[in-house]
Amino acid sequence: MNYILAIFLPPLSILLTGRPFVAVLTFLIWVPALIFSGGLTHPMFILLAWILIFQTREDRRDRRHRP
């Protein structure tokens, strides 16, 4: 579900992964980038959100399977 949210609102998706500082910083860059580029930079933020979501899931999986 978080991957779908990342398509529409990448900063909110990053916030839900537990990275508030990165989410705020992304939001402050994302809004002007959308306005000035006309949406051309939006895929970059989607990719960033997907990477952070994947990384968070991998970290949780590693912590759970450690002896």
Image (tube, rainbow, N blue to C red):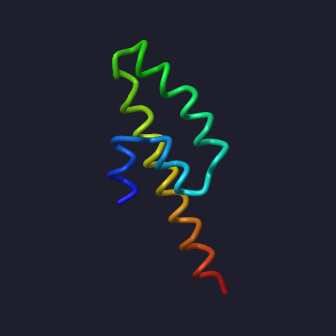
In the rendered view, would you say 63 is above or below 21?
below
The outermost residue toward the bottom is 67
Please name the residue shown 36% across and 32% down the image: 43
Question: In the image, is 20 to the left or to the right of 38?
Answer: right
Q: Is residue 55 left or right of residue 5?
A: right
Residue 22 % position (x, y): 62, 42
Q: Quadrant of the N terminus?
A: bottom left
**Nearer to the camera, 55 or 14:** 14
Q: Is residue 46 above or below residue 41?
A: below
Percent position of residue 53, x then y: 48, 55
Left or right of 54, for residue 66? right
For the image, the number of numbered tags is 0
Identity of the residue drawn at 39% across and 14% down = 37
Q: Where residue 28 sits in the image (x, y, percent)?
A: 58, 28
Residue pictured at 47% horizontal, 45% vertical: 49
The C terminus lies in which quarter of the figure?
bottom right
